[in-house]
Image (cartoon, helix red, strand yellow):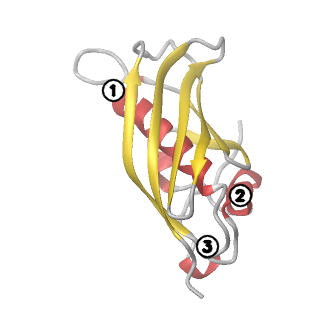
Amino acid sequence: MTEYSYGVVSPDILKTHDGLGFLKGIIAGTLPQPPICEVMGFHLIDAGQGRAVFEGLPDLQHYNPIGSVHGGFAATLLDSALGCAIFSTLHKGDAWTTLELKLNYVRGMTADTGPVRAEGRVIHRGRTVATSEGDLKDAAGKLYAHATTTCMIFPAKG
């Protein structure tokens, strides 16, 4: 089992990395996984230019009142993967935030689903707006949800 550290870096440290370098630091363990990863039970496991992958394990702690994994688990995994795919394209000092997330659920998850992976891929990267798409699949490649996002990019000042 992989041992992770969790936390938030200071803005000064964040500004010393481009987006992909920052994500690679998280994967390598030289930078902490975000606290949301510990709370939700998922982790950033891979990133490349315009691409990010998170893996999580749906479990009983994610259940809703009707006896299945809450849709927010899939939404959070996909929001993270799609946003970080865009983050991977940012230069040092750039910032970003999600403007919109559109999600389609295909099938429900349970504690028996096993590990799932959310992969995000950039569709378009403009100067101040970017879009990405992604999917959430189990180890056998079965689709559970897919999504698109639009993010606002704030180019570095200076």
Q: Nearer the observer, disc 3 or disc 2?
A: 2
Q: Nearer the viewer, residue 29 or 19?
A: 19
Q: Nearer the viewer, residue 90 or 8?
A: 90
Residue 112 relative to residue 99: left or right: right
Residue located 41% across and 35% down the image? 75
Q: Nearer the viewer, residue 148 or 39?
A: 148
User: Mark 3 sits on what residue?
Assistant: 14
Q: Quadrant of residue 103?
A: top left
Image coordinates of residue 100 in percent, x first then y, are 36, 46
- Say which element carries label 2: helix
Q: Nearer the viewer, residue 102 or 77?
A: 102
Q: Indicate which disc, 1 or 3, sits on the residue closer to the N terminus.
A: 3
Residue located 61% across and 43% down the image? 122
Image coordinates of residue 124 in percent, x first then y, are 58, 47
**Residue 70: mark in rendering:** 1
Q: Are the two marked residues, 1 and 3, in contact with CB atoms closer than 8 angstroms?
A: no
**Residue 52: mark in rendering:** none
Q: Quadrant of residue 62?
A: top left
Quarter that holds the C terminus: bottom right
Q: Are the two marked residues, 2 and 1, in contact with CB atoms closer than 8 angstroms?
A: no
For badge 1, the amino acid type reads: His
Quarter that holds the N terminus: top right
For badge 3, the amino acid type reads: Leu
